[in-house]
Image: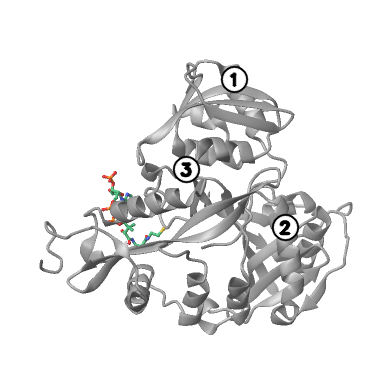
């Protein structure tokens, strides 16, 4: 078979072998325009279970690759589920749109099902790819540009204090401790192995996006990692803000906004971030982009629905379609006092939806009623749609633990 023959390319994936990785690094760099440091690659590789990476080879070249990471996800109410985190997905520009992605995701999901993961997760390079594979955007991320000079705190805004300036690598254990408490209560929180912490703390030049080394503010219940950017007009880009309590959030924002020589603060945050409510002029906070971060696919619908807590009682029969895996089915979901029982049923469904919509509802970031407007959740009883909204709502806003 000739390389790049569009008709005859065999798209059958095979497991990645150790000596594939240098070529996989090159395909990753070609696809994303960024060379991953071998040490960073080693950190991510340590999270791949045996048989968790596949490649497609054509005439000795790796032309497609995809893998999954063994992760743990926090769901509403603080339960934790094993999750297969799809990553490193790339198809060579010479081999696009011949079904390589579909074949690799099919193969990986056979493996993920055999390993018993109730959920698959990913972060998507483009919004139009993964819905057809049963993934729905499950967290909402907003990009903010805060005009720091205009950001005046209201006279009655709290001023809890307690923030120290620290060197991140010297205080990694404190960062880990706060991150672990945060992820235990935050839907979308992810376990972060030590290898990824070490990688973050390595703070390599190539990962700085043209900014300064990483600086940190530490609070007893949170932290901020950030870099300074820009010539002349300097600005801050927040790498990570973690706040276990509202007090920590306020204290960290006050500290960020206290950096006199910085013109603005750029951050990716969640819709319930408190900053606009603390300021005399909420327009100092400008949303420059809004989108998705974590995407979820429910592989085992009863296990996933039973693992989370709910905010209101509910009795519903869901008919879920899974076009990718030919799975889905009809499930009776009954919630009492926050706890769910969910099982397959022969009863007539009240609600019909695709599995990607269930992924979007799962962490409470999106509402059933929004999907009903789009005819993506079909139900003749508007009262039941409202009860779905109420039951799936969460008191802690979902956030992606970290990009992967
Ligand atoms: C995105 C990418 C992996 C797609 O690979 P591919 O082998 O061309 O995809 P396939 O031929 O298997 O397509 C599978 C399906 O997805 C659709 N699709 C593929 N890429 C798409 C895109 N960028 N936007 C919308 N739909 C897309 C195809 O039309 C096809 O649909 P269908 O099966 O319902 O008819 C590839 O273009 C790529 O490597 N891009 C750069 C790196 C990247 O973005 N990786 C993903 C990281 S999350």
Residue 293 can be seen, yes or no: no
The image shows residue 88 at horizontal and vertical percentages of 41, 65
Which secondary structure lies at badge 2?
A: helix
The image shows residue 208 at horizontal and vertical percentages of 55, 78
**Ligand 1 sits in which quadrant?**
bottom left
> Which comes before the other along the chain, label 3 or label 1?
3
**Tag count in the figure?**
3
Q: Residues within 10 Å of mark 3 (few under 14, many from 20)?
A: many
Q: Residue at x 12, y 58 (%)?
A: 8
Rendered view: 112 above or below 206: above
Name the residue tied to disc 2: 182
Q: CA distance from mark 3 to mark 2?
A: 26 Å
Name the residue tied to disc 3: 299
Residue 301 can be seen, yes or no: yes
Nearer-the-camera pick, 254 or 372: 372
> Which comes before the other along the chain, label 2 or label 1?
2
Which secondary structure lies at badge 3?
A: loop
Marks 3 & 1, CB-CB < 8 Å contact:
no
Marks 3 & 2, CB-CB < 8 Å contact:
no
Please identify, in this view, whether the residue under mark 3 or under mark 1 is nearer the observer.
Answer: 3
Q: CA distance from mark 2 to mark 1?
A: 33 Å
> Which comes before the other along the chain, label 3 or label 2?
2
Q: Residues within 10 Å of mark 1 (few under 14, many from 20)?
A: some
Q: Which mark is residue 384?
A: 1
Does the beta carbon at disc 3 come under 8 Å from ligand 1? no
Horizontal arrangement in the rendering, residue 311 relative to residue 40 (left or right): right
Nearer-the-camera pick, 279 or 369: 369
Q: Residue at x 47, y 43 (%)?
A: 299
């Amino acid at each position: 078979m000739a390389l790049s023959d569009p008709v005859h390319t065999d798209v059958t994936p095979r497991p990645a072998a150790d000596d594939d990785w240098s070529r996989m690094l090159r395909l990753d760099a070609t696809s994303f325009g960024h060379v991953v440091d071998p040490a960073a690659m080693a950190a991510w590789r340590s999270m791949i279970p045996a048989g968790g990476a596949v490649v497609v080879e054509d005439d000795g070249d790796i032309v497609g690759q995809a893998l999954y990471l063994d992760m743990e996800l926090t769901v509403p109410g603080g339960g934790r589920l094993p999750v297969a985190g799809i990553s490193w997905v790339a198809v060579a520009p010479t081999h696009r749109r011949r079904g390589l992605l579909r074949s690799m995701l099919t193969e990986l999901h056979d493996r993920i099902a055999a390993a018993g993961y109730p959920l698959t997760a990913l972060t998507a390079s483009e919004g139009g790819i993964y819905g057809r594979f049963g993934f729905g955007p499950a967290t909402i991320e907003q990009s903010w540009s805060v005009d720091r000079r205009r950001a005046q705190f209201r006279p009655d805004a709290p001023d809890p204090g307690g923030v120290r300036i620290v060197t991140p690598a010297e205080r990694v254990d404190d960062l880990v401790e706060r991150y672990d408490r945060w992820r235990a209560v935050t839907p979308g929180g992810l376990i972060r192995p030590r290898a990824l912490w070490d990688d973050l703390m390595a703070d390599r030049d190539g990962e700085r996006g043209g900014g300064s080394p990483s600086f940190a503010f530490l609070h007893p219940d949170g932290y901020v990692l950030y870099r300074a950017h820009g010539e002349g007009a300097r600005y801050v880009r927040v790498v990570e803000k973690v706040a276990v309590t509202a007090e920590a959030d306020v204290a960290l924002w006050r500290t960020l906004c206290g950096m006199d020589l910085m013109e603005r603060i750029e951050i990716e945050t969640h819709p319930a971030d408190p900053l606009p409510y603390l300021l005399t002029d909420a327009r100092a906070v400008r949303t420059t982009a809004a989108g998705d971060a974590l995407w979820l696919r429910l592989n085992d619908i009863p296990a996933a629905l039973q693992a989370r807590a709910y905010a209101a009682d509910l009795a519903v029969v869901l008919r879920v379609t899974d076009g990718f895996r030919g799975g889905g089915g009809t499930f009776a979901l009954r919630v009492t006092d926050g706890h769910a029982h969910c099982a397959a049923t022969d009863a007539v469904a009240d609600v019909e939806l695709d599995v990607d919509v269930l992924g979007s509802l799962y962490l409470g970031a999106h509402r059933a009623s929004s999907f009903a407007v789009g005819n993506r959740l079909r139900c003749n009883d508007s009262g039941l749609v409202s009860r779905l909204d109420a039951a799936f709502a969460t008191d802690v806003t979902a956030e992606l633990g970290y990009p992967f």
